[in-house]
Image (tube, rainbow, N blue to C red):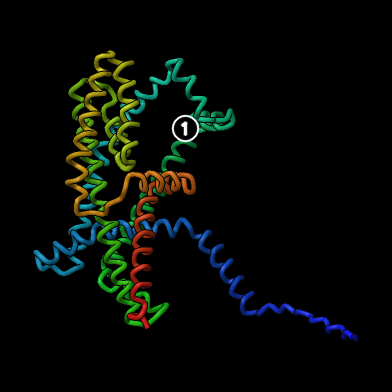
């Protein structure tokens, strides 16, 4: 029986030039975004300020019938006065008490723990040289101050225009699509972000101020030194649920024991327990009841990831970015369930 050899089949792979162009454009786009990452962070911060202040602008405009531009200016005036006033009141005592607090580092057992900071000899030498040359230090301080003021002013300007165009901001999506269904989805997305992210920002600021004020009053009444930096520390760590209040109590108790007496240390412990109980059972449910609900676990994980990827700024923006991503995923599931409405 004769068998005929089967002809060999050759496979040829061809790459579409259009695909190569798309890949190159995608890589270049990522590189471009990386190069302007600081600008993107500033824009996102301006967006956060916008969603936090826009409800106040809307309420003022509805109650007073003022033009939107004037309503924005009024809200901004109060916002800037609050920021500048708080800074002016807190900075002088904070600097004075912080310098006094640094002198406590002279204690030998605290110096031993400074090893954990992992500062190299070169870093310490550069720090000493910087402070050892007054002219360079003053120039560096002035440059940093000017840069901070410029960034703050730019942030205000960006958020101002975002609020001014808030009503039609969702229509900017026409750059990508002109379907009315997509435009309405963009509007729903922005409204949801404003409700959740804006509510979370306002709620966190209120909680920080209340916790900081309660800590300051309690520490002052107990006669604990360095009450201002300790209270600010407690207020800032309010952004880290559950862990924050516990961590903020450690330096306060240590200073009370070292500088006053063990009994004062016990009193500070009781103070922070009372503040934490008031926070968990009264303040958080009351302040956050109408705002975005973020579970403590999700918040902690987001902040840890943010610190790991982006340092201090990454930790600051971690929860807002989580809220935006969560809102986007929720909306995507809604679109997927009702995909027929978009065809």
Indicate the quadrant where residue 20 lies.
Answer: bottom right
Instruction: Estimate how packed mark 1 is, as few (under 14), some (14 to 19) or many (20 or more) residues with alpha carbons within 10 Å.
Output: few
Q: Which residue corresponds to the image point at 46% horizontal and 40% vertical from the top-left? A: 140
Question: Can residue 128 be seen in the rendering of this structure?
Answer: yes
Q: Nearer the viewer, residue 8 or 272?
A: 8
Residue 252: percent from left, percent from top: 30, 25
Provide residue 108's location: percent of width, then percent of height: 46, 15
Q: Position of residue 178 (x, y in %)?
A: 37, 82
Query: Which residue position is annotated with label 1?
Result: 134
Give coordinates of residue 25: x percent, y percent.
58, 71
Instruction: State which quarter of the image contains the C terminus.
Output: bottom left
Front position in the image: 305 or 236: 305
Tell me, yes or no, if residue 146 can be seen here.
Answer: no
Q: Which is nearer the eye, 87 or 342? A: 342
Q: Is residue 180 left or right of residue 132?
A: left
Q: Residue at x 27, y 61 (%)?
A: 194
Q: At numbered mark 1, what does the secondary structure look like: helix, strand or loop? A: helix
């Amino acid at each position: 029986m004769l068998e005929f050899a089967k002809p060999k089949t050759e496979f040829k792979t061809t790459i579409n030039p259009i695909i190569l162009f798309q890949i190159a454009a995608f890589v270049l786009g990522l590189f471009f975004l990386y190069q302007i990452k600081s600008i993107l962070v500033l824009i996102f911060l301006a967006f956060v300020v916008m969603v936090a202040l826009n409800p106040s602008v809307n309420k003022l405009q509805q109650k007073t019938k003022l033009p939107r531009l004037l309503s924005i200016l009024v809200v901004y005036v109060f916002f800037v006065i609050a920021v500048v006033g708080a800074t002016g009141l807190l900075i002088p005592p904070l600097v004075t008490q912080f310098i006094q607090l640094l002198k406590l580092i002279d204690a030998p057992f605290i110096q031993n723990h400074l090893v954990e900071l992992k500062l190299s000899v070169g870093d310490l030498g550069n720090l000493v040289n910087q402070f050892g040359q007054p002219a360079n230090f003053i120039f560096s301080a002035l440059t940093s101050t000017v840069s901070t003021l410029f960034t703050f002013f730019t942030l205000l300007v960006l958020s101002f225009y975002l609020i001014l165009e808030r009503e039609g901001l969702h229509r900017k999506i026409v750059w990508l699509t002109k379907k009315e269904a997509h435009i309405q989805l963009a509007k729903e997305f922005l409204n949801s972000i404003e409700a959740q992210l804006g509510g979370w920002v306002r709620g966190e600021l209120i909680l920080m101020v209340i916790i900081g004020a309660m800590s300051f009053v309690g520490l002052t009444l107990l006669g604990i030194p360095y009450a201002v930096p300790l209270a600010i520390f407690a207020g800032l760590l309010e952004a880290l649920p559950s862990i924050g209040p516990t961590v903020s109590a450690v330096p306060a108790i240590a200073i009370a024991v070292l500088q006053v007496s063990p009994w004062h240390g016990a009193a500070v412990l009781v103070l922070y327990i009372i503040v934490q109980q008031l926070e968990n059972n009264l303040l958080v449910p009351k302040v956050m009841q109408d705002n975005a609900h973020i579970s403590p676990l999700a918040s902690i994980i987001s902040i840890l990831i943010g610190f790991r990827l982006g340092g201090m700024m990454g930790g600051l923006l971690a929860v807002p970015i989580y809220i935006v991503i969560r809102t986007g995923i929720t909306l995507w599931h809604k679109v997927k369930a009702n995909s027929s409405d978009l065809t």
